[in-house]
Image (cartoon, rainbow, N blue to C red):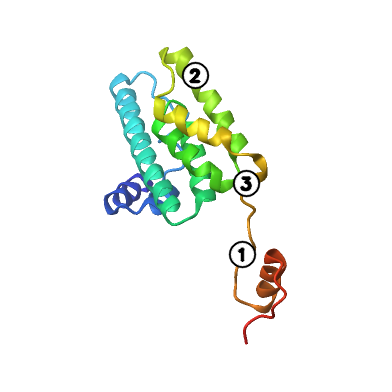
Amino acid sequence: SDVAAFRQAMGREDWPAALSLQRAPLLEGHAVRGFGQLDDWLARQRDALRADWRRAARAQADALESQGDAVAAFALLRQQLHDDLLAEDTLQALLRVAPATGERVAALALFERFREHAAHTLGLPPMPQTLALVERLRALRASRRPQPGPRCCAGPRCWAAMRRWLNWPRAAPA
């Protein structure tokens, strides 16, 4: 089953495989009326799988960030915050990668949603570490956002695109 394959991938710490197998909560939208114990078991299974999905998603986001793929890490962190807006450690990771993605405004908007939700739900302000990341992000000027360069395939068209991007007149290597 998908759940067994998901658990095997989790055991191997194969985060991409685990994430591809667990896209939605177990039997989402299904309730077992009249069978309280079964319904309770199903709720516990959903919670456990959701916690494992969050662990896999965070580990994969960290791996993507360390590999230099800030855009993919940001997207996965955003998805995690959609699942659990109160996950402040996830928000901090998103705020750290945001400058490398050009998603400064989106990251600040997510912070504001988090701040309001945490204040309303828990009566708590953001942690000082989170506020420091936000201030660092706010200090960045929009004009300093990194511009993505061309993807490299090492072919002649790629070299031409790279020269244009770098404003570099030299010919491609022979």
**Residue at the image position 37 percent from the left and 51 percent from the top:** 15
Question: Could you give the CA–CA distance between mark 3 and mark 1, rounded to whole angstroms?
Answer: 18 Å
**Residue at the image position 59 percent from the left and 29 percent from the top:** 109
**Residue at the image position 60 percent from the left and 41 percent from the top:** 103
User: Is residue 84 something that shows in the picture?
Assistant: no
- 66 on left or right of 113: left
Residue hosting label 3: 145
- 127 on left or right of 146: left
Three-letter residue code for mark 3: Arg
Return the residue found at the far bottom: 174
Question: Could you give the CA–CA distance between mark 1 and mark 2, rounded to whole angstroms?
Answer: 39 Å
Q: Nearer the viewer, mark 3 or mark 2?
A: 3
User: Is residue 121 something that shows in the picture?
Assistant: yes
Residue hosting label 2: 117
Three-letter residue code for mark 1: Arg
How far across and how far down the image is residue 19, in percent? 42, 47
Q: Which mark is residue 49?
A: none
How far across and how far down the image is residue 95, in percent? 49, 37
Q: Earlier in the sequence, mark 1 or mark 2?
A: 2
User: In which quadrant of the rendered image does the C terminus lie?
Assistant: bottom right
- Secondary element under disc 2, as helix, strand or loop, is helix
Q: Earlier in the sequence, mark 3 or mark 2?
A: 2
**Label 1: how many Cα within 10 Å (few below 14, some 14–19, many 20+):** few
- 42 on left or right of 29: left
Q: Residue 82 versus residue 164: which sits nearer the camera?
A: 164
Residue hosting label 1: 151
Three-letter residue code for mark 2: His
- Secondary element under disc 1, as helix, strand or loop, is loop
Kindly indicate whether the residue at mark 2 contacts the one at mark 1 (C-beta within 8 angstroms).
Answer: no
Kindly indicate whether the residue at mark 2 contacts the one at mark 3 (C-beta within 8 angstroms).
Answer: no
- Secondary element under disc 3, as helix, strand or loop, is loop
